[in-house]
Image (cartoon, grey):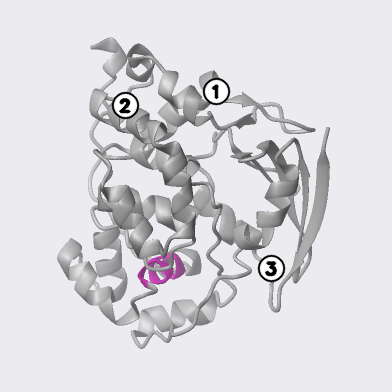
Amino acid sequence: MPSCSASVVFAGPASPGLTLAPLRRGRGDPCHHDAPDGAIWRTSLMRTGPVTARICRGAPDTVDCEAWGPGAGEFIEMLPALLGADDDTTGFQPAEPTLAAAWRRVPHLRLGRTGRVLEALMPAVLEQRVYGTDARRAWRRLVNRYGAPAPGPAPEHLRVPPSADAWRRIPSWEFHLANVDPARARTMVGCAQRADALERLVNRPPDSARAAMMSLPGVGEWTAAETAQRAFGDADALSVGDYHLAKMVGWSLLGHPIDDPAMVELLEPVRPHRHRAVRLLEASGLAVNPRFGPRAPIPNLAEM
């Protein structure tokens, strides 16, 4: 079986956990595993085939990676980008006191990019208009049933994400059993049918790529932003339309909740780094997000 290894050395502290955290879809994600020894295991379906990778910090400023499978060489080529080695913070000088404090607290936060559009887009569609627990349950079920075994010495539960062809072939009743409503199912199948064009978006400027994604039925501003953050490392992809985000930004920066238009106005001074600002709040521990009341129960479509 093909295997490769490489190391990436940074000018400052290496923080693979911070960079890769947004890629994990819940604790039971079949494509991402945080091991007790601190290593991060990930699977992906590269253009050249499936890959399993083990990523860990080898020294305070160094990240080591071992990869197995037909896609191992391609994955290693993308490793610096995945870890945010080419993340550009030029022009990011937040004047807002909380953002400035967050930047000082985690100056080593880097935004990585996978370069794999469909792998970022499909779970984002699953997360539309539902609670995260429901979306992650659906992701686990669909990947476990339609993904492929992880190559190499991977943890037992890891799977490679489904191919575009596999997504296209999932029957409607399987989406139903995964508690995915027909609208999201149609969007996912439609995106899979346009997979080749979607993957080419990595060659466009991020704002143009987001606009192209939003031309697809069922893909709105929030879904395009969530995809761009992960696939392109888009530092300005603000998740407008998120149920909690505007409230969190308001509480963190102003001491009270705000809505989406107010959030967009509030973060305008840090454009083109609005997503970076949000990630800094989260990673620094300075995000404030009071919760009120219990969550509503999640309807089970499979029982309806």
User: How many angstroms separate mark 2 from mark 1 (CA)?
Assistant: 17 Å
Residue found at x 42% / y 70%: 286
Residue found at x 70% / y 38%: 52
> Can I make out residue 74 in this image?
yes
Q: Disc number at residue 144?
A: 1
Q: Magenta segment, principal secondary structure?
A: helix
Badge 3 or badge 1: first in the primary sequence: 3
Nearer to the camera, 173 or 12: 173
Residue found at x 45% / y 70%: 280
Q: Position of residue 158 (x, y in %)?
A: 64, 31
Q: Dot 1: what SS?
A: helix
The amino acid beneath tag 3 is Ala
Query: Which quadrant of the rendered structure holds the C terminus?
Result: top left
User: In which quadrant of the rendered view does residue 132 lie?
Assistant: top left
Q: Does the residue at mark 3 contact the one at mark 1 (Cβ under 8 Å)?
A: no
The amino acid beneath tag 2 is Ala
Dot 1, crowdedness within 10 Å: few (<14), some or many (≥20)? many
Q: Disc number at residue 14?
A: 3
Nearer to the camera, 141 or 120: 120
Vertical arrangement, residue 34 with respect to residue 245, above or below: above
